[in-house]
Image: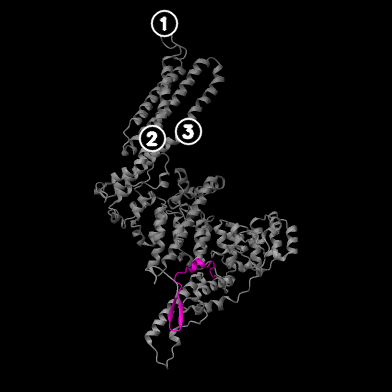
């Protein structure tokens, strides 16, 4: 007897019959082929028969072992208990056999046999449906020649030399179907994938019958059209479809159709062609052995890849023609999740600066739905009614001004490339939002709410993690229950805090009222409240959005302070199960970042300290040794009455005072205590003032030097020749300083005093019109 927990194979004795039960067998690892139709029934049957016969299960599919209850003679007296025991054992083995068969079927084939009671019934149904297919035109074993004999053919195909390849085909007809490499690629596969001479492919197709094409598969069960789609050979795809359109509806070893392979390989032109001809010939998919790529779980893979490629029009058209595609899901592939996670398809994902946001909010969109705050536009009325293309807040203007407004934008779109690009991005954002609404509408039509939840749960958590407030808002609008969604027991606000998603946080805190106050008092299983979560270190990809460890530390403090203002007052002092307050968690989590920020601050301040000290030395020496010298009798400067001397004196004094101030500021940074809270305002403010003073010092020093040169060498008419190059060269160090150091100064100013990442008002772009 086998020990507990051990599976073994054997036979079950019941009277004169023995029922095998090989419970240890993993049929899925034994079978490499999944039955998808007539095209691969023979290969599937061969593998299944090997499995069945090797475990003595053949009697269950050929009908030898029948239901014991059906064999009972009603005229004879029988032992009912023995019959019931016998039936249970037979049923156990028959169900195992049926499970083996079901596990080797594609989803569409599975639909044909669902409801059949015995393995014999299933086997007979599959045989009657698929066994009458045309025998393969060739078999991998029909050609026994070694691949080395076909090296000249392989080289001829790679060169596109039809003359040499044609001679080989004329001498050896088997060469048309030979396997040329370890991937079992035929000459047609190789020609489609590598040959640049499309005429070679056309000549080769003339030598091959259309009936042979479905069975010309490589090791991945890809026929030539699969391969043409995969490599993006549109011309070859056109020729293959013209020769045998049934190729469009044959799945490969991964249960993918040619149209799938084209979008998987990011070949947009080939994909759009295959999509068109697939729709045109969709009636062929209704014949036995062929399947539609727009039905079943494979349609989900198609739709999600189209969304991932940003083909919004195509995705919208697919859902309009095949609404069930929006409501299907395959493992982790969910259409609503895909469109919600495509952040670059929305305004929030672009990161526009102030100028680009201004252009974005005013540029006129000619088709689709405008972003929030504007109305739907009708492209057909653009020329007849310009007012229809003007935002509502501009329609109060005089008609003449409206006409000028419209014409101005039309001219800008034609002649200013970056404005045209922003307009195109805005159109794509509108299409993405329209597609999101369309999918939400289809999902909302599902009758079972538990299935609806499966769609929006994955979608809204993905939208939160990708910081996509537009998607979050639309999902909540269609599915109000989504506001209570949790991921790993964390509600949406806590997810936004953990993942540092400021845009979603702003939306949930400042624009949503439902469930907000109940979420802010929640604690997790470890006793952490919102402030504890804000005290944890941000994900690395969020930290890297800001350059420099000091600014990263500042951003983390800004998050902590913002959550503190939203959380309950007593949260600041409450402890979790580790007896840590939020500030204790913050210090522990950010210990390394604080150290890195301190080192960055000190190195930066130390570098600028040396520069400021050098400038002080130079300008101080210049102040006591004035150009032209002093009068020996009065001690006054000789050039004192000249305006250029006054310029020298003022600029030299300004340079001395500002450089001294910057030196003291940088020294204060070097001697700071570097507490966590110092990174919020104190240290950045000192660095900003120090850099600003240093910039003024450098600028004043160059002006003073230029004035000195003019006083010394620019007397008489010589200044006409020398003042121009002096003025030009004076700008060089100033421009260099601005180019090299101004980005750091701007980052510091905007991070400390600029537009905050947290807002207290509704953003005009997501405000309802």
Q: Is residue 753 visible?
A: no
Determine the CA span between mark 3 and mark 1.
Answer: 48 Å
Q: Is residue 80 left or right of residue 409?
A: left
The residue labelled by disc 1 is 633
> How many numbered marks, from 0 up?
3
The spot of residue 291 in percent (x, y) is: 55, 70
Determine the CA span between mark 1 and mark 2.
Answer: 55 Å
Q: Is residue 510 or residue 103 the one in the foreground?
A: 103
Mark 2 burial class by Cα count in 10 Å: few <14, some 14-19, many 20+: some
Label 2: state its secondary structure.
Answer: helix
Residue extending farthest front: 1
The residue labelled by disc 2 is 599
Q: Quadrant of the N terminus?
A: bottom left
The spot of residue 97 in percent (x, y) is: 48, 75
The residue labelled by disc 3 is 740
Q: Is residue 604 or residue 274 the one in the foreground?
A: 604
- State the image quarter where residue 719 is shown: top right
Residue at 35%, 39% (x, y): give it: 594
- Comes first in the chain, label 3 or label 2: 2
Magenta residue span? 11-35
Mark 3 burial class by Cα count in 10 Å: few <14, some 14-19, many 20+: few
Q: Where 556 sits versus 340, above or below?
A: above
| Front tag of 3 and 1 | 3
The spot of residue 659 in percent (x, y) is: 40, 25
Q: Is 16 in the magenta? A: yes
Q: Is 269 in the magenta? A: no
| Front tag of 3 and 2 | 2
Q: Is residue 46 visible?
A: yes
Q: Is residue 198 or residue 191 the one in the foreground?
A: 191
């Amino acid at each position: 007897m086998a020990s507990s927990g051990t599976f073994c194979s054997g036979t079950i004795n019941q009277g004169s019959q023995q029922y095998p039960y090989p419970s240890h067998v993993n049929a899925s690892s034994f079978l490499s082929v999944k039955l998808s139709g007539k095209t691969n029934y023979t290969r599937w049957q061969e593998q299944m028969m090997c499995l069945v016969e090797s475990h003595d299960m053949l009697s269950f599919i050929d009908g030898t072992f029948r239901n014991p209850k059906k064999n009972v003679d009603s005229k004879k007296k029988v032992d009912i208990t023995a019959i019931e025991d016998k039936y249970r054992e037979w049923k156990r083995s028959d169900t195992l056999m049926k499970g083996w068969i079901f596990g080797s079927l594609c989803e569409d084939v599975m639909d044909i046999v669902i409801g059949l009671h015995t393995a014999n019934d299933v086997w007979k149904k599959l045989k009657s449906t698929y066994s009458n297919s045309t025998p393969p035109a060739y078999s991998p074993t029909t050609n026994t020649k070694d691949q080395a004999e076909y090296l000249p053919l392989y080289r001829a195909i790679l060169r596109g030399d039809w003359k040499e390849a044609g001679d080989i085909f004329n001498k050896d007809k088997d060469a048309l179907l030979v396997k040329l490499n370890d991937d079992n690629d035929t000459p047609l596969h190789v020609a489609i994938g590598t040959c640049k001479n499309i005429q070679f492919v056309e000549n080769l197709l003339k030598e091959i019958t259309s009936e042979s094409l479905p069975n010309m598969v490589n090791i991945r069960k890809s026929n030539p059209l699969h391969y043409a789609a995969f490599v993006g050979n549109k011309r070859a795809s056109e020729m293959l479809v013209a020769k045998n359109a049934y190729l469009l509806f044959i799945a490969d070893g991964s249960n993918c159709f040619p149209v799938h392979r084209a979008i998987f390989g990011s070949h947009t032109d080939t994909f759009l062609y295959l999509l068109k001809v697939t729709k045109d010939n969709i009636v062929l998919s209704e014949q036995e052995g062929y399947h539609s790529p727009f039905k079943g779980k494979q349609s989900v893979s198609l739709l999600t890849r189209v969304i991932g490629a940003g083909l919004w029009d195509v995705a919208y058209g697919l859902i309009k023609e095949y609404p069930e595609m929006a409501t299907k899901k395959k493992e982790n592939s969910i259409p609503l999740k895909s469109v919600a996670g495509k952040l670059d398809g929305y305004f929030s994902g672009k990161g526009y600066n102030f100028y680009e946001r201004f252009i974005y909010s005013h540029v006129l969109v000619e088709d689709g739905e405008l972003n929030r705050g504007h109305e739907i536009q009708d492209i057909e009325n653009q020329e007849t009614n310009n007012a229809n293309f003007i935002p509502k807040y501009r329609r109060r203007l005089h008609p003449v001004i409206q006409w000028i407004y419209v014409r101005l934008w039309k001219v800008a779109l034609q002649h200013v490339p970056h404005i045209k690009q922003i307009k195109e991005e805005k159109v794509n954002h509108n299409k993405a939002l329209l597609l999101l609404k369309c999918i939400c509408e289809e999902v909302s039509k599902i009758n079972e709410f538990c299935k609806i939840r499966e769609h929006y749960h994955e979608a809204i958590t993905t939208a939160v993690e990708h910081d996509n407030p537009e998607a979050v808002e639309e999902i909540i609008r269609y599915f109000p229950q989504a506001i209570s969604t949790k991921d790993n027991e964390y509600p949406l606000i806590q997810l936004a805090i953990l993942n540092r998603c400021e845009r979603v946080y702003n939306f949930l805190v400042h624009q949503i009222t439902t469930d907000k106050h109940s979420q802010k008092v929640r604690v997790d299983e470890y006793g952490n409240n919102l402030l504890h979560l804000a005290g944890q270190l941000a994900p690395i990809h969020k930290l890297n959005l800001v350059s420099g460890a000091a600014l990263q530390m500042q951003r983390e403090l800004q998050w902590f302070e913002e959550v503190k203002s939203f959380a309950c007052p007593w949260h600041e002092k409450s402890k979790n199960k580790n007896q840590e307050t939020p500030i204790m968690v913050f210090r522990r989590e950010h210990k390394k970042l604080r150290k890195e920020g301190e080192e960055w601050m000190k190195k930066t301040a130390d570098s600028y300290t040396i520069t400021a000290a050098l400038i002080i030395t130079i300008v101080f020496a210049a102040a006591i040794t004035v150009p032209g010298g002093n009068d020996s009798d009065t001690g006054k400067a000789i050039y004192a009455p000249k305006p250029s001397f006054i310029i020298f004196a003022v600029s030299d004094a300004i340079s001395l005072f500002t450089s001294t101030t910057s030196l003291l500021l940088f020294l204060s940074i070097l001697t700071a205590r570097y507490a966590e809270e110092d990174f919020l305002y104190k240290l950045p403010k000192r660095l900003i003032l120090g850099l600003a003073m240093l910039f003024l010092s450098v600028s004043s020093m160059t002006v003073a030097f230029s004035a000195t040169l003019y006083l010394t060498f620019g007397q008489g008419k010589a200044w006409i020749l020398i003042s121009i190059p002096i003025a030009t060269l004076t700008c060089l160090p100033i421009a260099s300083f601005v180019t090299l150091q101004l980005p750091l100064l701007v980052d510091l100013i905007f991070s400390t005093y600029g537009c905050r990442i947290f807002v207290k008002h509704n953003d005009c772009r997501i405000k309802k019109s």
